[in-house]
Image (spheres, grey):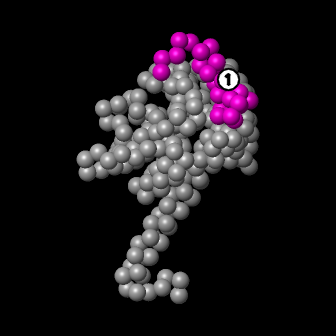
Amino acid sequence: MSDLRALSVPEIRVLGVLCEKQRTVPDSYPLTLNALVSGCNQKTSRNPILDLSDAAAQAALDSLRSLSLVTESSGGRVYRYGHNLDGVLRIPSQSVALLTVLMLRGPQTPGELRIATERLHNFADISSVEAFLEELAERPAGALVRKLARLPGARESRWTHLLGGEPALVDGASSAQGGGEEMSLGEVASLKNRIATLEAELAGVKAVLGRVCSELGIDPES
């Protein structure tokens, strides 16, 4: 993925939710921060399950805006946010639909992707899904997805997105066979989310402390 830096877990979740809600609830899109956080933390159709704070979601929005992946507009009394994934990556709506599901649900087989993307795009058959996945994997500007090795006993191979960089566990075989030394993708994602949340909250505390020190005439570095 040469044209973008690796995104963090909160950034991926925020971007995925914006892409999803554009198609599923167009009347409410672009989203307010409250609606976005609710979508990020919902318990269904999400893997891993996250618990993003408003501060962490706002920090993710701000960093995505710096990459032109998110747009901000003023609607009434609140700001609203939309995505620009297709514009930045120059990919068609079918590919956006596939990336959206992979960002929100983790690795999926082509069959699972066809079902999960029904509200985003109606693929004619599994072959159509596979064709767009191959296109994303062979993209000249940098691969956006990768086909994982087939798990023992599985009929289909799963695919994963590369927006967060290379997957921590390429084939998942160690976890499936009971190896406890490798961390699963979900565990790695959960750990990254906790770190990103703590960093966002720390930045908020520092900002408040800086304002207090400024009002009191105190040098925070002293």
Q: Is residue 117 visible?
A: yes
Looking at the picture, how far across and down is residue 171, in whole percent?
A: 73, 35
Image quadrant in which you'd find residue 71: top left
**In the image, farthest residue toward the top:** 124
Residue numbers of the magenta segment? 121-149
Task: Give the labeled residue for mark 1.
Answer: 134
The residue depicted at 47 percent of the width and 64 percent of the height is 201
Image quadrant in which you'd find residue 130: top right
**In the image, farthest residue toward the left:** 76
Q: Looking at this view, is 191 or 13 the one in front?
A: 13
The residue depicted at 43 percent of the width and 23 percent of the height is 119
Looking at the picture, how far across and down is residue 174, in whole percent?
A: 74, 39
Q: Quadrant of the N terminus?
A: top right
What's the residue type where badge 1 is placed? Glu
- Residue 42 belongs to the span the image colors magenta: no
The secondary element bearing badge 1 is classed as helix
What crowding class fits label 1: few (fewer than 14 Cα within 10 Å), some (14-19), or many (20 or more)? some
The residue depicted at 69 percent of the width and 41 percent of the height is 2
The residue depicted at 40 percent of the width and 55 percent of the height is 54
Q: Is residue 31 above or below residue 193?
A: above
Q: Looking at this view, is 177 or 196 the one in front?
A: 196
- Residue 146 belongs to the span the image colors magenta: yes
Q: Is residue 117 above or below residue 6?
A: above
Q: Is residue 144 left or right of residue 101?
A: right
Looking at the picture, how far across and down is residue 127, in whole percent?
A: 62, 14
Figure label count: 1
Looking at the picture, how far across and down is residue 169, in whole percent?
A: 71, 41
Q: Looking at this view, is 115 or 165 the one in front?
A: 165
Q: Is residue 175 visible?
A: no
